[in-house]
Image (cartoon, rainbow, N blue to C red):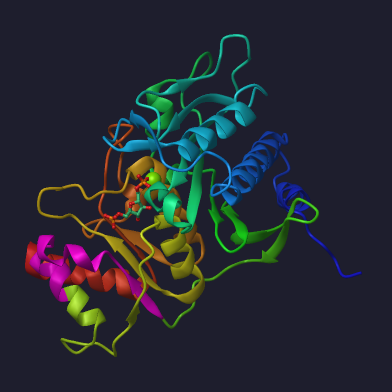
Amino acid sequence: MSKVTTIERHILEQQASFPDATGTLTSLLYDLALAGKLIASRTARAGLADILGGTGIINVQGEEVQKLDTYANNAIYRMTNHAGRLAVMGSEEAENLIPIPDRYTTGKYVLLFDPLDGSSNIDYNVNVGTVFTIFHRKTASGPGTLEDLLQKGSEIVAAGYIVYGSSTMLVYTTGQGVHGFTLDTNIGEFLLSHPNIKIPAKPKYYSVNQGHYSRWSEGVKRFTGWLQGEEGSPGALSMRYVGSMVADIHRTLLAGGIFYYPIERQSPYGKLRLLYEVIPMSAIIEQAGGYASTGYQPIREVQPKELHQRSPLFVGSRELVEKAEEFIAKYDG
Ligand code: AHM
Ligand code: MG
């Protein structure tokens, strides 16, 4: 039998290169993988169980909360709140920070997550995903605070996502490369299927909501034209857009290319959430040799000021993201 690497074994092997590691991060990542399995199983049954459609509750972003969002949010919270690993959490589905219950001890890490990204796609059997970010706490002890959560991408300890697609995949980084695991549903384990992922040198697709063209700045319009073969570009790229960021960036990571959600007329900060979506996905792409920018500055340098802050995002192959910055600098000032 050839070597089978489960996610647990992989995380443990990576931990071995940190002599001071206590195993806390390893356990936390394993808890998140377990939450991912619960969400995957529930998502796969979405059409059968009575969990399609909305709950009628409007979340802090002004969108209707889907039943699966609530389930995913609770699964992650319950898996990670009690073992003394976290000081505080933040979720895209929760208006304020999520404290660790008083009856449990607090730990040295903080967790931010988008429990079910792309949830408007659930009713149509289209891919959705979970995104997570882990930082060291900044405060010394006691309950974690907002200061612990408002950290820059450059401070990330670990980031990952789970994409619930034709199969379920978990992709994570702790700063030692990007590694992908596919869920074997027969044995219920995530198995290493994509070790040390590098974004391909030759870009294949660009990915954007082209239906919003009329809302874009001149720089973004011209950049998109360049991707399509105008203005002396090396050739036209094909376009793919799922409308689930995790799926769109996952494809960008494996195929090469660019995903962007720019500033738009009437939404001066873009749509995506800096802490729950933009920072972790950017960290993963950069670990795989790509680059992520707001269009004006690297994402990893942006200091979050609010939990639910939004940010424009250009992420993928370095040369394409730098080209976007060039067009924006030239036409948008
Ligand atoms: P969500 O967190 O409410 O699901 O919204 C985020 C999603 C992303 O997954 C996706 O990239 C984007 O919204 C799609 O937005 P649009 O429909 O404007 O293209
Ligand atoms: Mg989201």
| Nearest the eye: 181 or 148 | 181
Q: Is residue 207 above or below residue 104?
A: below
Q: Position of residue 72 (x, y in %)?
A: 53, 37
| Nearest the eye: 207 or 299 | 207
- Count of labels in the image: 0
Going by the picture, which residue comes out furthest to the right?
Answer: 1
- Can you tell which quarter of the image residue 23 is in? top right
Give left or right: position of 4 versus 262: right
Going by the picture, which residue comes out furthest to the top?
Answer: 103
| Nearest the eye: 307 or 290 | 307
Q: Is residue 77 above or below residue 46?
A: above
Give left or right: position of 161 versus 167: left
Regarding residue 117, the answer to whether it shows in the image is: yes
**Residue sitting at 55 percent across and 55 percent down?**
164
Is residue 57 shown in magenta? no
Q: Position of residue 106 (x, y in %)?
A: 59, 18
* Location of the N terminus (image quadrant): bottom right
Q: Is residue 149 above or below residue 178?
A: above
**Residue sitting at 13 percent across and 68 percent down?**
219
Regarding residue 113, the answer to whether it shows in the image is: no
- Can you tell which quarter of the image residue 62 is in? top left
Q: Position of residue 85 (x, y in %)?
A: 63, 27
Q: Position of residue 313 (x, y in %)?
A: 29, 56
Q: Is residue 96 above or below residue 24?
A: above
Give left or right: position of 274 versus 155: left
* Location of the C terminus (image quadrant): bottom left
Q: In this picture, which residue range is highlighted in magenta? A: 204-222
Give left or right: position of 241 versus 263: right
- Can you tell which quarter of the image residue 208 is in? bottom left
